[in-house]
Amino acid sequence: MRLTALEKIVAKQTAMELSSYAIYSPIGSGRDIDQVQLIYPLCD
């Protein structure tokens, strides 16, 4: 997911907080928020 979309899920982040997530960023472009499953089922 794009880090800029993160504030739609949790809250607004400072630039320093967003930069701390850079180590988790995969190579390539991020996904839009509607492409990410936000709620995972407990059991299949």
Image (cartoon, helix red, strand yellow):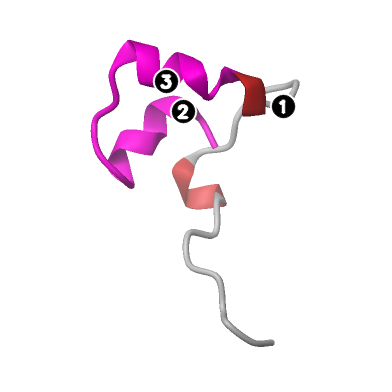
Q: Secondary structure at mark 1?
A: loop
Inter-mark Cα distance, 1 to 3: 15 Å
Q: From this view, report whether residue 38 is shown above or below residue 33.
A: below
* Residue at x-position 55% and y-position 51%: 36
- Disc number placed over residue 34 in the picture, else none: none
Asked whether 32 or 25 is in front, the reply is 25
Q: Which residue is mark 1?
A: 26
Per the rendered image, the range of residues in magenta is: 1-22
Q: From this view, report whether residue 35 is shown above or below residue 44.
A: above
Q: Crowding at label 2, few (<14), some or many (≥20) Cα neighbours within 10 Å? A: some
- Indicate which disc, 2 or 3, sits on the residue closer to the N terminus: 2
* Residue at x-position 54% and y-position 37%: 1
- Disc number placed over residue 3 in the picture, else none: 2
Tag 1: amino acid: Pro
Q: Are marks 2 and 3 in contact (CB under 8 Å)?
A: yes
Q: Looking at the picture, how far across and down is residue 3, in whole percent?
A: 46, 28
| Left-right relation of 36 to 7 | right
Asked whether 27 or 43 is in front, the reply is 43
Tag 3: amino acid: Leu
- Disc number placed over residue 18 in the picture, else none: 3
Q: Crowding at label 3, few (<14), some or many (≥20) Cα neighbours within 10 Å? A: few
| Left-right relation of 25 to 36 | right
